[in-house]
Amino acid sequence: MFPRTGPDAPPARATAPDGRVTVAVITRDRRASALRTLDALTALSERPPVIVVDNGSDDATLRAIRRHPVAARVLRPGRNTGALGRNLAVEYARTPYVAFSDDDSWWEPGSLGRAADVLDAHPRLGLLAARTLVGPEGTEDPLNDVLAASPLPDEPDLPGRPVLGFLGCACVVRRDAFLAAGGYHPVLFFGGEETLLAYDLTAGGWGVAYEPSLTARHHPEPSHRAGRGPLQLRNEVLTLWLRRPVPVALRASARLTAAAVTGRPAARPALRGLVTRLPAALARRHRLPPHVERAARLLDERPLAPTQGSAPA
């Protein structure tokens, strides 16, 4: 079970901080949800340092976060940075590893320590994707099965299953690897941004692996609808233009155009967003190394999982 939060929650264990993992949280105008996440992080025995990137919240939200006993470092870029707020948090972190949470997600006790142990033991490992449980009932996110069934071949110097996707609020990165790969890409901004980072980490020689012994909790608001919205549809195609062969990107663009013409929900705004950002994507385009392209092709025919949050490939 996830830790109880609120005034009747048990106090955090009086143990020495682990010192290896910082937790980075991005938030915007979700005071109650952000405080619940900070409550859960405070209860962790690893006692990780926490960095909160505020993407333009109102003053009441900021005051509440600053008063919270987790004593988070709050970064205010002065605008909504989307997923790029995670890049800022990693730059400011002073630990070798950084775990990501959104303001509606947190980590189960012991998972961060285990993640650090795994990363310590596997120096080529750049990112660990965790198992995600959704809501108070702890329902398995459908992405868990997709990652566990990855068709990518085993790599002897990596743990778990090699993958080219993950959930952004349920992963732990090696700070040096994340920065070397450039972090999350500015052309994508937010929504389905994980696949491109997995490509770039792998292209840089880093491993990306799914390890189900690590568990993250995700409690999206009831109004949050599952599935891919316009931003995720847009970014799926932009990712192809940024890294994949032109015929692959053209076919995906044609499918999105056909869906927009036939009135598929979310396709029209996704297509408009694609047209707007395509020049920037083409200016920053570079192909994946052959071995990463081969791995990506193994996954091309696999459907995306209908996750409760982002829907990485």
Image (cartoon, grey):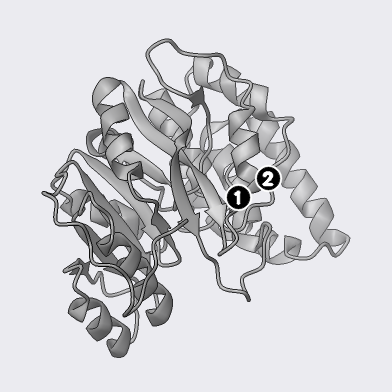
Against 2, is 32 above or below? below
Badge 1 crowding class, 10 Å Cα cut-off, few under 14, some 14 to 19, many 20 or more, is many
Q: Residue at x 33, y 73 (%)?
A: 79
Q: Could you tell me which quadrant the C terminus lies in?
A: top right
Circles 1 and 2: CB distance less than 8 Å?
yes
Nearest the viewer among 166 and 183 is 166
Q: Tell me the tag on residue 305.
A: 2
Please state if 263 lies on the left or on the right of 185 as rendered. right
Question: Residue 193 location, x and y as percent?
Answer: 50, 49
Q: CA distance from mark 1 to mark 2?
A: 6 Å
Dot 1 falls on a residue whose secondary structure is loop
Task: Say whether residue 170 is left or right of residue 307.
Answer: left
The residue that appears at 57% across and 56% down in the rendered structure is: 138
Task: Write down the residue under mark 1.
Answer: 311
The image position of residue 183, as x and y in percent, is: 34, 44
Identified by mark 1, the residue type is: Ala
Q: Is residue 72 left or right of residue 158?
A: left
Residue 308, compared with residue 166, is above or below; it is: below
Residue 181, compared with residue 219, is above or below; it is: above
- Which residue appears at 57% of the width and 45% of the height? 312
